[in-house]
Amino acid sequence: MNISEEILNILKQVGVTFFTTYPCAKIRNLYNLIHQNFQSVPIVKEEEGVGICAGAALTGANPAMLIQSTGLGNMINALCSLTLTYQFPLLVLASWRGVYKEKIAAQIPLGTRLPKIIEGMEIDYHIVKHRSDLPVITRAAKAAFERNEIQIILLSPQLWEEEVEDVTPELTEFSGTEVAVGALPSHTKRVFTRYKVLEIIVPFLEDKLVISNIGLPSRELYQIKHQPSNFYMLGSLGLASPIGLGVALSSINPVVVIDGDGSLLSNLGSLATIAQEGPTNLTILAIDNSVHGSTGNQITATSQFVDLALTAKGLGIEHTFRATSRDEISSVLSKLQDGPNFIHIPTRPGNESVSTIPLSPIEIRDAVMKKIRH
Ligand SMILES: Cc1ncc(C[n+]2csc(CCOP(=O)(O)OP(=O)(O)O)c2C)c(N)n1
């Protein structure tokens, strides 16, 4: 049996009744199995999941979360001020990043400090590295649900070396030509993939300061056309637009943010801050593929419910546009006036096979700073 299936069986046996989930590439099989077998809420940010689970616990549910370990960083206050304070039960399964064969530099500082951080919160945690460690999940879940405790399971990437890859189909099928436009006007088409859109916008980015979203957006951009003024994000999901705002407010350079639907949804309030501060030199290109593409195409709320252009407008960004075809994208970009501008580009899901960026965080930072100083 696959590791993911074995974990699923354990979770059923210990009586988990409710899940909130946020994706990580390492746990995509388990993510899909959990959605197929439990009442599960895909959340926009891990802190939100703590609140939803506490609400479910008020009704007598046995709640659990499936997340990436970075999400624990986003949950600390809620875990302490809500779950610990009111003594709600919560089982957290976290894909532990930054500690084993990690290729992404930004994962390491939090991943390696995490045990100490959890110990500092006086919360129980257990490390699962091998199939033989799986019984600890049963013991932890029982402790959580019988004693109203938080129990955290750190799932080491080592564990997934025993997993047969991709046992479950992805939640959505994208092979057809028509991709649902959900909340968008019915004439809107999701025409291109992210890679194609990046190819179209690359001439517009030339010599501008570019803040590029975490994961595949940055890696694809690097492959299409690297320039020293690109700030490639390696972590800190949801902070592309806030970083762009910080640069734009403190320099006269035109600043372009390449953001994504998953990342924007995790931090929508930052659009309100951008509207409030009104930097004229800031343009946000929201590449909305309606999934968390970088972690295995788990659908986001823009696939059916959220119109990001209306959202940006509603949060106060007056100069908001939608562009889907090559002509629309080029025409909007060529006519841009003073910002802040928000350009919603609905796209199809789909990822190019690209390698990681061969630059260190410090090299990325210093190249951008040099460009700003000149
Ligand atoms: C706090 C946290 N939780 C989970 C992740 C895993 N993660 C990395 S990229 C990403 C998806 C971002 O989706 P989106 O902004 O829509 O960009 P796309 O990859 O679809 O282009 C996720 C969930 C993370 N980096 N940080």
Image (cartoon, rainbow, N blue to C red):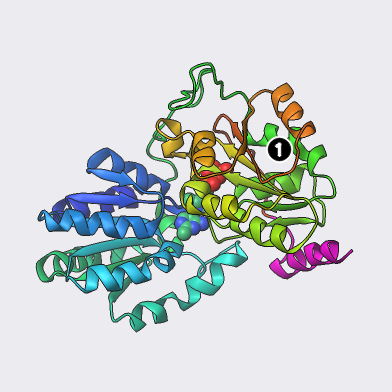
x%, y% of residue 300? 43, 39
Whether residue 280 appears in magenta in the rendering, the answer is no
In the depicted view, which residue is nearer to us: 269 or 16? 269
Question: On the rendered structure, is 88 left or right of 285?
Answer: left
Hey, what amino acid is under mark 1?
Answer: Leu
Whether residue 358 appears in magenta in the rendering, the answer is yes
Residue drawn 41% across and 54% down? Answer: 45
x%, y% of residue 365? 74, 66
Residue 264 appears in view = yes
Main secondary-structure element of the magenta-colored stretch: helix
Location of the C terminus by quadrant is bottom right
Query: Residues in magenta?
Result: 357-374
Question: On the rendered structure, is 98 left or right of 10?
Answer: right
Residue drawn 56% across and 64% down? Answer: 102
Residue drawn 41% across and 38% down? Answer: 301
Report the residue marked by disc 1.
198
Residue drawn 22% across and 63% down? Answer: 90
x%, y% of residue 222? 74, 49
Residue 293 appears in view = no
